[in-house]
Image: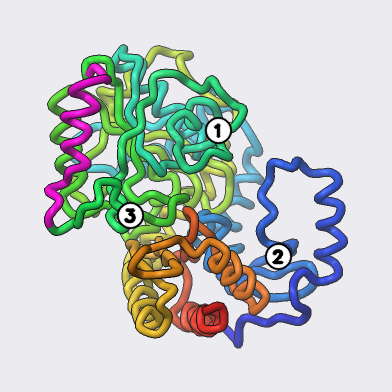
C-alpha cells in the first residue's frame, strides 16, 4: 500500500480554500462544514484532496464505501450495466438486475421465512418505506422509537429521530404518533444503573410505564430501532436486550423495524448487525454500504408483512439498474474477499489498540463497537464522564491535518468506520497518528 498518509500542504490547502469559498456562496447552509478539505479522488482506503494530500479514510463516506474507493469489480459491474441500460423505473417495468438483487438480498435473511424487497434511493427513504409498510399491514397509527436514534431527515423518519434539537428545530409538526423510549446506552444509563445488575430496567420501563400508562399497545404498529446506534456514537446494547424487547413486542403484536442503514451490509462483521443478537425482525431497512457508494436503499420484509396494495409505495429511481449492479458486485465481494471476517478480525485489532491507548490517555472514557463500527467516547473526567466536546473536535481536526479522516458521533465520540477492505497496516498507521494526537490534546 505504500507509506500513507501523505500530506503535501496542511489542509485546507490553497485549492481547497478557493473551492470552499464558492461552497459558502452557492451551496445550502444546511450542510455540515466540519472538514476543511475538498476531495478529488480515491483508491481503496485512500482519499485524495484537490491539493494532492492523501488521507487514510477511517470514515468511508460515512460508513458507505464498504469496498473502498473504485474497486475494479464494482466499476466493471457498473460499466457493463451502463452499456445495457441506464435507467428504467423498477416500479413500473422490471429489469433483470433489480429482480436478481432482490433475490440475493432475501437470501441474506433467515431461511425459515419468505421475504420481499421494496426499493428506494437512500436511508431516509428506506425508513419511510418501513414505517408506511408497518402502518399498512397493521392498520395501526402509532410507533415507538428510541432516544438517541437517527433514522433520517424527512418528516416521517425525522419524527423517529432523537439525536439532537438541531435536527427538528422549526420543523414541527412532524409525523404524529411517535413515542420515544430510552435506548440501552449503558455508559450513560438514564436510570443510573450498572449493566451487571440492572435487570434491563429500560425494558421494564417500556412495559410498565410507556405501554402500561400512556401509549395503548393495541395502537402501536411497530417499534423502530438501530441494532447499534450510529450517529449517537456507535452505542451497543447489552446482551439479552433485543431478545427481551422482541418478547415484549410479540406480546402486543407490535412489529420490529430494524434500521440497518449504517450497521448493515457487513459493517458489524455479519451481514446484518441484528444477527449478533439472534433476533429476527419483521422489517430490515438498508442503504449506505449496500451499493458501495451508489444511491440505493430499501426495505426487506417478511412476505406476510409486505402485503400492501399495488401503488401503495414506490420510487422512480429506487432500484435503478446501475445501483443494483453495484450492489450485486458489493454483495459478491463481501463473500468472495471474506470481508465479514476481515471486519471482525480487524475490528478486534483496532479495539485492542484503543484499549492500549486508554491505559495512557485518561481522556478515553469508553470503547465499544462490533466489527468495523467502533466508537471511542472522550471525556474530561472518567469519574464524572463529562463529555470532552471541544477536545473531540480538536482530535478530529488534528488527525485530519496529519492525514487521517475520522467521524464524530454523539457529543464526544470518535467513530471509526473504514471500508471493509481496510488493511491492518493502514489501520495501524492511522491509529499511531490518533495515539500521538490524543497525547498532545491531553
In the rendered structure, does residue 425 fall within the stretch colored magenta? Answer: no
- Can residue 155 be seen here? yes
Secondary element under disc 2, as helix, strand or loop, is: strand
Crowd class of label 3 (few under 14; some 14 to 19; many from 20; radius 10 Å)? few
Q: Quadrant of residue 351?
A: bottom left
Residue under label 2: 41
Give the Cα separation between the discs numbered 1 and 3: 23 Å
| Percent coordinates x, y for residue 201 in the rendering | 17, 43
**Main secondary structure of the magenta stretch:** helix
Q: Are marks 2 and 3 in contact (CB under 8 Å)?
A: no
Residue 400 is situated, as x and y percent measured from the top left of the image, at 64, 72
Location of the N terminus (image quadrant): bottom right
Label disc, if present, on residue 188 of the rendered structure? 3
User: Which secondary structure, mark 3?
Assistant: helix
Q: How is the image coloured?
A: rainbow
- Marks 1/3 in contact by CB < 8 Å: the verdict is no
Q: Which quadrant holds residue 406? A: bottom right
Q: Nearer the viewer, residue 185 or 254?
A: 185
Number of the front mark, 2 or 3: 3
In this view, the mark in front (2 or 1): 1
Amino acid at each position: 500500500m505504500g507509506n500513507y498518509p501523505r500530506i503535501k500542504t496542511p489542509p485546507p490547502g490553497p485549492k481547497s480554500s478557493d473551492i470552499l469559498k464558492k461552497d459558502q456562496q452557492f451551496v445550502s447552509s444546511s450542510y455540515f462544514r466540519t472538514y476543511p478539505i475538498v476531495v478529488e479522488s480515491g483508491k481503496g482506503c485512500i482519499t485524495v484532496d484537490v491539493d494532492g494530500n492523501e488521507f487514510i479514510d477511517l470514515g468511508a463516506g460515512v460508513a458507505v464505501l464498504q469496498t473502498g474507493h473504485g474497486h475494479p469489480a464494482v466499476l466493471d459491474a457498473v460499466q457493463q450495466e451502463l452499456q445495457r441500460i441506464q435507467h428504467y423505473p423498477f416500479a413500473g417495468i422490471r429489469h433483470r438486475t433489480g429482480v436478481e438483487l432482490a433475490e440475493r438480498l432475501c437470501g441474506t435473511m433467515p431461511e425459515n421465512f419468505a421475504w420481499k424487497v421494496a426499493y428506494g434511493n437512500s436511508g431516509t427513504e428506506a425508513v419511510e418505506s418501513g414505517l408506511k409498510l408497518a402502518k399498512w399491514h397493521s392498520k395501526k397509527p402509532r410507533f415507538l422509537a428510541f432516544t438517541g436514534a437517527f433514522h433520517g431527515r424527512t418528516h416521517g423518519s425525522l419524527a423517529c429521530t432523537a439525536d439532537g434539537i438541531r435536527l427538528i428545530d422549526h420543523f414541527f409538526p412532524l409525523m404524529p404518533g411517535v413515542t420515544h423510549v430510552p435506548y440501552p446506552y449503558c455508559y450513560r444509563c438514564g436510570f443510573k444503573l450498572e449493566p451487571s445488575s440492572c435487570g434491563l430496567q429500560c425494558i421494564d420501563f417500556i412495559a410498565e410505564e410507556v405501554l402500561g400508562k400512556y401509549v395503548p399497545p393495541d395502537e402501536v404498529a411497530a417499534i423502530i430501532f438501530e441494532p447499534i446506534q450510529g450517529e449517537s456514537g456507535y452505542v451497543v446494547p447489552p446482551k439479552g436486550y433485543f431478545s427481551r424487547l422482541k418478547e415484549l413486542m410479540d406480546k402486543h403484536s407490535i412489529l420490529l423495524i430494524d434500521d440497518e442503514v449504517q450497521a448493515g451490509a457487513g459493517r458489524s462483521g455479519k451481514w446484518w448487525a441484528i444477527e449478533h443478537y439472534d433476533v429476527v425482525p419483521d422489517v430490515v431497512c438498508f442503504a449506505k454500504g449496500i451499493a458501495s457508494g451508489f444511491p440505493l436503499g430499501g426495505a426487506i420484509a417478511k412476505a406476510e408483512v409486505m402485503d400492501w396494495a399495488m401503488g401503495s409505495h414506490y420510487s422512480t429511481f429506487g432500484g435503478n439498474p446501475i445501483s443494483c449492479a453495484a450492489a450485486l458486485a458489493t454483495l459478491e465481494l463481501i463473500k468472495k474477499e471474506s470481508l465479514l471476517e476481515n471486519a471482525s478480525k480487524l475490528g478486534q485489532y483496532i479495539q485492542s489498540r484503543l484499549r492500549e491507548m486508554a491505559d495512557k490517555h485518561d481522556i478515553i472514557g469508553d470503547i465499544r463497537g462490533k466489527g468495523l463500527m467502533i466508537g471511542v467516547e472522550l471525556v474530561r473526567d472518567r469519574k464524572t464522564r463529562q463529555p470532552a466536546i471541544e477536545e473531540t473536535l480538536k482530535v478530529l481536526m488534528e488527525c485530519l491535518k496529519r492525514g487521517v479522516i475520522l467521524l464524530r458521533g454523539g457529543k464526544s465520540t470518535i467513530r471509526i468506520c473504514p471500508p471493509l477492505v481496510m488493511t491492518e497496516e493502514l489501520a495501524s498507521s492511522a491509529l499511531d497518528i490518533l495515539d500521538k494526537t490524543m497525547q498532545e490534546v491531553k
